Image (cartoon, grey):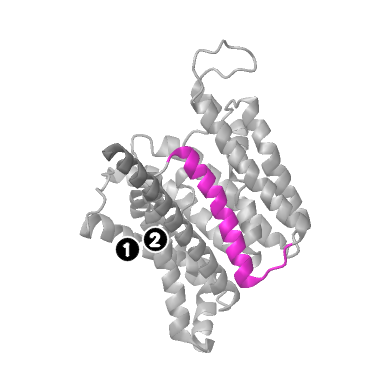
Amino acid sequence: MEESILCQWSVIRSILAIFQWWGFNVTVIIMNKWIFQKMDFKFPLTVSCIHFISSAIGAFVVIKVLKLKPLIQVDPEDRWKRIFPMSFIFCINIVLGNVSLRYIPVSFMQTIKSFTPATTVILQWLIWKKYFDWRIWASLIPIVGGILLTSITELSFNMFGFCAALFGCIATSTKTILAESLLHGYKFDSINTVYYMAPFATMILAIPAMLLEGSGVIEWLHTCPSLFSSLTIIFGSGVMAFCLNFSIFYVIHSTTAVTFNVAGNLKVAVAVTCSWMIFRNPISMMNAVGCTITLVGCTFYGYVRHMLSHQTPGTPRTPRTPRGKMELIPLVNDKLDDKV
């Protein structure tokens, strides 16, 4: 009886974790798009900087004040040699995501972001000469095909926004790959990751944001008709960005890898649907088909990764068989790639 109750509670906790993760993720995306499109605050560097500052403060409160999560100690030397390079890529990744949101619809941006598994595999194959099972390559076909179909049929296509989203995928993949070597020996969760990286990211982005967008922000402050409510939304998006990181920590510890993968792809569908209901950006039938194919491909890719990672070792070596089980999958688990 007790086991049954515990099992039911585990399922309920997983469902709640997934829904609150979806809620924060969709809220952050919608708020950012609203800031750029409806409030005419077209300063993605400044928005990203506000997110970093909010996340740094939030992580400090959670770890140092509330002590909800133990701090992972990092040597001062490693902070500059390991954390700083990761923070630089982390910063680029977030900035490119916000830049793309300024120029293209949420639906298109989220679909392109689903290209990350393909860029991760391709980068490891080209640069790190890593071997992948043929089933991994096969699982990427619907992802690539769906992205191509979506891009060709996108009614609100913008080349700059498209490139920003695409390079954002590459930045995400690079961060995922380098994390294995740069953060070797440190088992970071999403909260500790933000605790160490957000201050560095703020330091990296603050000066470019002031130089490139400072005058525009000042002009916007003087011309904004409803300044208080607008600033509330802008800084509120920063608070939601931190809450998203906290929700990722919670959902990772409440679900399995397969559940997380499926929920992550469904989250994209939820974000696309919600954004369309709010912004009413035109979506053609073929565009929707391309988005669906991409999400199905991502789910299939996650399934193949999971299946191969649990494959019984000892298969005889052949030219088509990898030398070890770890060569079948990317270097690190990309559960934490959803941070905003």
**Magenta-highlighted residues:** 256-283
**Relative to residue 282, is residue 70 drawn left or right?**
left
- Residue 318 horizontal/vertical position (percent): 62, 12
Q: Residue at x 60, y 51 (%)?
A: 113
The answer to which image quadrant residue 7 occupies is: top left
Task: Give the residue type at disc 2.
Answer: Phe
Q: Residues within 10 Å of mark 2 (few under 14, many from 20)?
A: many
Give the SS element for disc 1.
Answer: helix
Quadrant where the image shows the N terminus: top left
Q: Residue at x 39, y 43 (%)?
A: 82
The residue positioned farthest toward the front in the image shown: 1
Residue 274 among magenta residues: yes
Residue 43 among magenta residues: no
Is residue 81 placed above or below 32 in the rendered structure? Answer: above
Is residue 329 in sight in this rendering?
Answer: no
Q: Along the line of sight, which residue is nearer the eye, 12 or 149?
A: 12
Q: Are marks 2 and 1 in contact (CB under 8 Å)?
A: yes
Q: Which numbered disc flags the more N-terminal residue, 2 or 1?
A: 1
Is residue 132 placed above or below 280 in the rendered structure? Answer: above
Task: Give the residue type at disc 1.
Answer: Ile
Q: Main secondary structure of the magenta part?
A: helix
Residue at the disc numbered 1: 57
- Residue 192 horizontal/vertical position (percent): 33, 49
Give the spatial CA distance, label 2 vs label 1: 9 Å
Is residue 17 placed above or below 258 in the rendered structure? Answer: below
- Residue 326 horizontal/vertical position (percent): 49, 25
Q: Residue at x 38, y 46 (%)?
A: 83
Residue at the disc numbered 2: 242
- Residue 233 horizontal/vertical position (percent): 46, 75
